[in-house]
Image: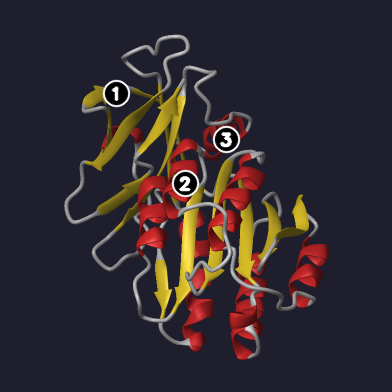
Amino acid sequence: MTLTTLFAAALAFSTLQFSTSVDLVEVYATVTDERGRPVEGLEQDDFLVYEDGTPQTVTAFAAGDMPLSVALALDRSFSMRGERLQTAKSAAHVFVGQLRPGDQAMLIGFGSVVETIAPLGRDRVALHEAIRTLGTFGSTALHDAVIAAIDEVQRGTGRRALVILSDADDRYSKATADEVVAAARAADVLVYPVSFGSRPSPLFDDLAAVTGGRSFRVPRLDRLTDAFQEVARELRHQYLLGYVPARAGQTGDSQYRTIRVEVKRPEVTVRARKGYLAR
């Protein structure tokens, strides 16, 4: 694929939203080798896509660094005070520095309340300033924060992603963990949760799995920046697959359809969203 063709494909995809109001279903796929490194250079014919177990014909394809809308959600509760928050802010600055000029980003801070600190846009100076001035406040409304962040970044264009950092202990939300996963399943947002400590977070693992993102556990503060850089690197090396479902939906018939993506290459791992809500 030439650079001109790739640019045209990425531009066309960036104007679409993942929605069943159009026939085309969009799926972002991340392919890594046995060492976790992004696999580049794959072509459309290297992929197999299944919906509810039925093979689909991929009719649109793009690869590489496509336009991105990303929400960065930072836990600002009192449990993050001191070195934790300072390290989180440093890692956030590094992540923002990895974004491309055409990318849009926003900052969400959450404690007892969920607040949009910097709206979605391309003003990097304002975003860095918002990160710099972020302070601790309240308890941890983690579930509410994930749902609110997904809703906010869903309004963006192109690829949409949520990078969320927390100790993964919810202490104040109205929403349940099941409601958080349901919201993620119904949206088109890649979720990259990052948690402190070595204790697994089933919620964070579920969010990454259903959306095609990746969950990180950071046992030491000095590894946090590495995790954020890894997320930034992965977001620059993805594939976009589009297909028109072989089985047409019925008007008013709301149902969840599963998606499975495979790659015809040995010793690689592919991650993609697990499905979508057809309406």
N-term-proximal mark, 2 vs 1:
1
Q: Tell me the CA gap for discs 3 and 2.
A: 42 Å
Check residue 162 in the rendering and tell me which mark sits there, or answer none: none
Which element carries disc 3, helix, strand or loop? helix
> With 178 as the anchor, is 133 left or right in this view?
right
Residue 190's x, y, as percent?
A: 48, 49
N-term-proximal mark, 3 vs 1:
3
Q: Amino acid at mark 3?
A: Thr
In the image, 97 versus 127, the foreground residue is 127
Q: Nearer the viewer, mark 3 or mark 2?
A: 2
Quadrant in the picture for the N terminus: top left
* Furthest residue in direction top, as rendered: 251
Residue 57 against residue 162 in the figure, above or below: above
Pointer 2 local density, CA inside 10 Å: few below 14, some 14–19, many at least 20? some
Residue 217's x, y, as percent?
A: 40, 74
Are circles 2 and 1 on residues that touch, CB within 8 Å?
no
Name the residue beneath numbered marker 1: 56
- The answer, for residue 10, to whether it is visible in the render is yes
Q: Tell me the CA gap for discs 2 and 1.
A: 30 Å
Q: Amino acid at mark 1?
A: Gln
Which element carries disc 2, helix, strand or loop? helix
N-term-proximal mark, 3 vs 2:
3
Name the residue beneath numbered marker 2: 179
Residue drawn at (28%, 37%) of the image = 260
Residue drawn at (46%, 72%) of the image = 195
> With 154 as the anchor, is 244 left or right in this view?
left
Name the residue beneath numbered marker 3: 4
